[in-house]
Image: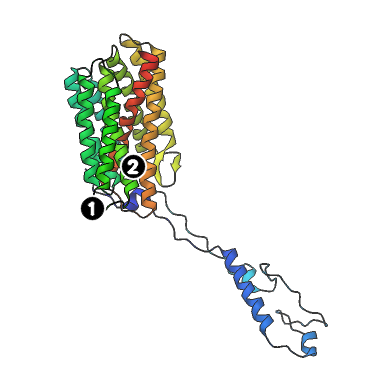
Amino acid sequence: MPATPSPAEDFGVWPPASEPASRRRRRDEAGRDTGRRDQPGRDADRRDRAPRNDGRETDGHHPEHHPDGDPDPGDVADTGDSPEKPAPIPPLPPVRRLVSLGVAGFAALVTIALIVGAQTRHESYAVVVFGVQALFVGVWTIASRPPAPRVVGIVGIAVAIGTDVAAVLNRPASLAPLAYVTAAGFIIGVVGQLTRPAGRQRVTESLGSSLVVTLGVVSFASLVVLGRIPHGTQAIVACLAAAGIALFIARFSDAIAALPRIAPQVPRGGAGVVLGTMVGTAAAGAIGNYLDGLSPLPSALAGLATAIVAVMVDLSVGYAEASRIIDGDEPALWLARHIQGPIGAIAFAAPAAYVASSLLLL
């Protein structure tokens, strides 16, 4: 595993703010004109024959007055002899190839675990899903750094257990019990946040983190419900394969060439995102051609929807982390912040797979 990089290596450095040269020039000109007006009056002869800057004298004419903000032609400082140096352009944060390859491999492993687990019994699949849920809770809590991490983590694990049990035991298979557990988990999270020693300090941020973690674990549990529906296992294979392949291709392309850069402080390339979505859609269509109960076109459309959600969530996590660094916050644990994107992308791609499968495949 590569050594933990410094925040500057991942996110670059912002240049210090500087006053524009034109504003400084106008301010200096205003100060010189004020000083001239404050000088005591001279006799008429000296006023009529005032020397110019170049040593010549006027023939009774007053020197031309330049309003504030306009450069004086006789002023040496405004002739371009001493130009202002432009502010240095900050370097773009580098794309660390080994990190991109490691993140791509992690996304592939999580996807394979969820696809292979879907081929087992529902109870066994719920255990596999719970393991991924626990990983999601830990990574998201460490990376987002909420004010009350213990409350967020405990609520997330409790909701994960409740949703997995409800997804396995409910007859017939339905998302309604998951909604009840979600509401109960959110209420418990609110009570836990308001009763902590810090009171209401940063309570909004903490509640937002609790809500995201709760929705993420419930999204994973929807795969257990989908697997209990006829042809639901085939739908899980097609949709999750599209999401996982899209994430893998996007990250692998960043390791080769992250071009064009999506944003200066986000070390991701737009070509990989587009290519990953296209390859994931094609893979879902190919899977639909071979699996019983699916057809290529609906399977490709369902895979397209799932892949788009996955790559967009992965990108949004990168933007959120870059925004925290720009605001001056300390970066999260290196491993957690790098795998937060893929694990969150697969989590929120799961309900997209459920909806797309219900509309197009089942």
Q: Earlier in the sequence, mark 1 or mark 2?
A: 1
**Alpha-carbon distance for marks 1 and 2?**
18 Å
Expressed as whole percent of the image width and height from the top left, the position of residue 3 reads: 23, 48
Q: Which mark is residue 17?
A: none
Element type at marker 2? Answer: helix
- Which quarter of the rendering shows the N terminus? top left
Nearer to the camera, 343 or 266: 343
Which callout, 1 or 2, points to the residue nearer the camera?
1
Label 1 packing within 10 angstroms: few (<14), some (14-19), many (20+)? few
Q: What amino acid type should be assigned to the residue bearing mark 1?
A: Pro
Element type at marker 1? Answer: loop
In the image, 138: left or right of 19? Answer: left
Residue 98 in view of the camera: no
Expressed as whole percent of the image width and height from the top left, the position of residue 189 reads: 26, 40
Q: Which mark is residue 208?
A: 2
85 is higher (above) or lower (below) than 164: below
Residue on which disc 1 sits: 197
Label 2 packing within 10 angstroms: few (<14), some (14-19), many (20+)? few
49 is higher (above) or lower (below) than 312: below
* Residue drawn at 77 percent across, 88 percent down: 46
Nearer to the camera, 35 or 85: 35
Q: What amino acid type should be assigned to the residue bearing mark 2?
A: Gly
Q: Are marks 1 and 2 in contact (CB under 8 Å)?
A: no
